[in-house]
Image (cartoon, rainbow, N blue to C red):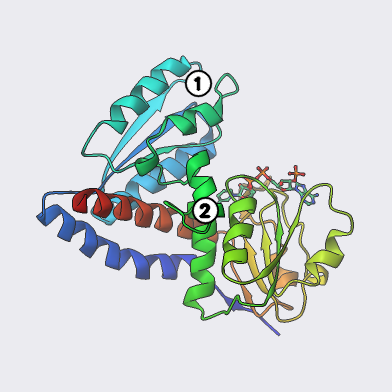
Amino acid sequence: MTAQLLDGVALGQQLRAGFKQRADQLAAQGTRPGLAVILVGEDAASQVYVRNKVNACAQAGIHSEKYVFAPDVAPQVVFDKIAELNADPKIHGILVQLPLPRHFDADAVLEAIAAQKDVDGFRAENVGALMQGQPCFIPCTPYGAMKFLESAGISVKGKEAVVVGRSNIVGKPMAMLLMHAGATVTVCHSQTKDLKAHCLRADILVAAIGRPKMITGDMVKPGAVVIDVGINRMADGKLCGDVDFESAREVASYITPVPGGVGPMTITMLLANTLESAERSASA
Ligand code: NDP
C-alpha cells in the first residue's frame, strides 16, 4: 500500500481562499482583521516562521504588525508592548513566537495576552476551555491536524489514536481534540515503555516529538493515518519530520509530508483564529 498524501499546501490554499472573502467583508463593515506578531531574539527558524505568518496575513487580507526585540531585551518592554496591543482595536490576535530567551517567563508572557486575542490558544484559561470542550481558540497546530482528518473524510469516532509527545502546544491539545472527536487516545512521551507497541495499535498516529524520522514504517499499523508534526533541520539543510516518510508511506493509508503538511496548516489555522476573533469583535 502506498499512502495517500495529506497535502497541507493544497488544503491551506483552499481554506485561505475563503478567508480573503471573509476578511474583505469584515473590512467593508469597518473591521479589517489584524494580527500582531512578537519575536524576541534571532532564532533563524523563528524568523522564518514569523515571515511566513506575516506574508500569509497579507495574502488573506489580514492586517499584520511585526515587533522584533533584541535577545537581551528587558521582559518589561515586551509586557508593555503586549499591554498596548491588548488595548489596540486594530489588533484581534496577538502571537508571541516561541521559544523565548531564557530570561523570560514564557508562561507569564502568554498569560499577559488578552484572552480574546490569544489566537494561539496557549493561555491557561483557553487551555481549560479546550479541556472542557468549549475552546475559545483551538491551538493552531493540532487544529490544522484535525482539519486534515475532516477534509479527507476520515472518521475519528471509536478509533484508536496515539499521540507521541505531550507538549502544551502540540501533544496535549492534540490528544484533547482527538478525545473530544470520539477517539480512544493514548499519549506517549520520553518515559513511555515500548513505544512501538503503542504506535502499532494506532488507527491515527500523531508524531510531535522533535526527533528526526523516529517513527519508522515498522511502527505503523497497516492502513493507519499518520500525521507528522515534527520539523527537524538536517545537516544538509533539508527539513524532515518525526516520521520516516519513505518507510511509513508504504504502510499507512494517509500521511502528511514534511515540509508541506502540518506546517502550512498551522499558519492557515492561525489566520482562521484571527478572523474568528475579528468577527467576534465586530459583532460584540
Ligand atoms: P517539545 O520538545 O515541547 O515536546 C516533545 C515531546 O516529545 C515531549 O513530550 C517529549 O517527552 C517527547 N519525546 C521526546 N523524545 C521522545 C522519545 N524518545 N520517545 C517518545 N517521546 C519523546 O516539542 P513540541 O511539541 O513543541 O514540538 C514537537 C515537534 O513538532 C518539533 O519537531 C517541532 O519543531 C514541531 N512543531 C511543528 C509545528 C508545525 O507547525 N508543524 C508547530 C510546533 C512544533 P517528555 O515530555 O517526556 O520530555
Q: Is residue 122 above or below residue 13?
A: above
Helix, strand, or loop for circle 1? loop
Q: Is residue 173 left or right of residue 121?
A: right
Name the quadrant containing residue 250.
Answer: bottom right
Label of residue 144 in the image:
none
Q: Are marks 2 and 1 in contact (CB under 8 Å)?
A: no
Mark 1 lies on residue: 71
Q: Is residue 183 left or right of residue 80?
A: right
> Which residue of the protein is positioned furthest toward the front in this rendering?
132
Q: Residue 1 appears at what percent x and percent y?
A: 71, 85
Name the quadrant containing residue 145.
Answer: bottom right
Q: Residues within 10 Å of mark 1 (few under 14, many from 20)?
A: some
Q: Is residue 169 left or right of residue 34?
A: right
Q: Is residue 159 above or below residue 70?
A: below
Residue at position x 57%, y 65% in the image: 180
Mark 2 lies on residue: 130
